[in-house]
Each structure stands twice: as structure tokens, then as C-alpha cells.
Amino acid sequence: MQCPKCKKVMLLDGVLSENLAVKYCQECKGTWIPAKEYEAWQTDQIGKPQSEVPSGTLNVDFVLSPFDTKAALCPECQRYLSRAKVNLKTPFYVERCMQCRGIWCDYGEWEVLEQLGLHTTIEQLFSNEWQSRSRERQFFDQERQATIDKLGSELAASVFELADALAQHPNGDFGVAYLMRRVTANRQPPNAKT
């Protein structure tokens, strides 16, 4: 079996955390996880905590592999590997063969998936639902950071706290409308008609 990224380099037998049998490349340090091995290992992980969509600003010590953007063929059945984006401060792609269900992780990606608690349910990364929630989370984090940048951290913290309180209150929309009127009224020029 040849490395899908280095092409002519043969994959060697190896083991990932908790006795997961894999194939790895000595050159690029990528890892091929055969579906049969992963599914058997996954069964042993039942009952262990799983992760939701991680925060887009989660600071994980991670150096992106130069092979992450390189398209690849499955080392088992030679079909193109599908890619699922993991949105972090340094985003990366996990690859999977949709035919034989094997998984390819470039160097360092498995360790990040472990840190995030996503390594036991990699298939969820390829679902439309997970990718949609990931994009929503990324947008939320970007919006939150923009609020901090515009208002400063102290005022932004007050806004976030108030937003949470209003979201919990049955008449929270009245509070939002009041704030909108007050903020826009204060922005009108002195001679503007109201």
C-alpha cells in the first residue's frame, strides 16, 4: 500500500492511541486508518465523552502539514478521498474514502482530533449537519471577535452578558427594541427630525 500523498513511498504498520492499528508514511508522517480497524477500535470507545463542534477560535498548538491541501487517492481502492474541514484557528482537512471508508490524517491532525474529542466519531465531520454547525460556530466566533474589536473587551463583555439575559427573558425582544431605539436616537444629528 502506497502513501496517498508521497505516492511512491510504501506505508508501514503502526499504532495510534489506545491500540488503533494503522499504516503510516515515514516521509510525510501521514496516517492511513483502515475502516475495519477504525470501526473495531470505535466500538471499544463507546461510553467515552464525545465532542460537539469546536469553537472556531480554539487555540490548538498545531502546525499545518504542507500536504493538507494536496488531493489524494485512497491507498486501498484508488478513489479520490473526500475532504472535511475542521474549522479551528488553523483549519485543516481530514480525508476519507467514501468507498472503503478508510481515513487519512496528515501529520499532527490525529493529535488535534484527540484534543478536541473528535477522533472517536470522525464520520460526523463528513455530515452536512456537522459542517453546517461548524460554519455557524465560526460565524458566531467572528461576530463576537468583531464586537470586541469595535467596543473594547469591557463593554463587549457587558453586551454579551446582556444579550444572554435578554435571550433567556420571555420579553427579551422588548429590551432589544428599546436598546435599538436608544442607540439610533443618540446617533441622529442635533437638527434631525424625529
Image (tube, rainbow, N blue to C red):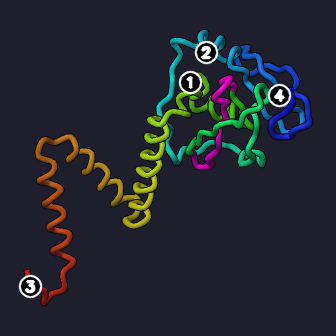
The reply to whether dot 1 and dot 4 touch (C-beta < 8 Å) is no
**Mark found first going from the N terminus, 4 or 3:** 4
Q: Verify whether residue 97 appears in magenta.
A: yes
The reply to whether dot 2 and dot 3 touch (C-beta < 8 Å) is no
- The residue identified by callout 4 is 24
Where does the N terminus fall, quadrant-wise? top right
Magenta residues, start to end: 88-102
Element assignment for label 2 = helix
**Mark found first going from the N terminus, 4 or 2:** 4
The reply to whether dot 4 and dot 2 touch (C-beta < 8 Å) is no
Q: Residues within 10 Å of mark 3 (few under 14, many from 20)?
A: few
In the rendered image, the vertical position of residue 97 relative to residue 180, given as above or below? above
Q: Which residue is painted at 62% across and 42% down in the image?
A: 60
Q: Which mark is residue 193?
A: 3
Identify the amino acid type marked 1: Thr
Q: Residues within 10 Å of mark 4 (few under 14, many from 20)?
A: many
Q: Is residue 105 left or right of residue 185?
A: right
Point out residue 147 in the picture as x, y percentages from the top left corner.
38, 60
Q: Is residue 178 left or right of residue 132?
A: left
Identify the amino acid type marked 3: Lys
**Mark found first going from the N terminus, 1 or 4:** 4
Q: Which residue is painted at 32% across and 51% down in the image?
A: 160
Point out residue 155 in the picture as x, y percentages from the top left corner.
33, 60
- The residue identified by callout 2 is 42
Element assignment for label 4 = strand
Element assignment for label 1 = loop
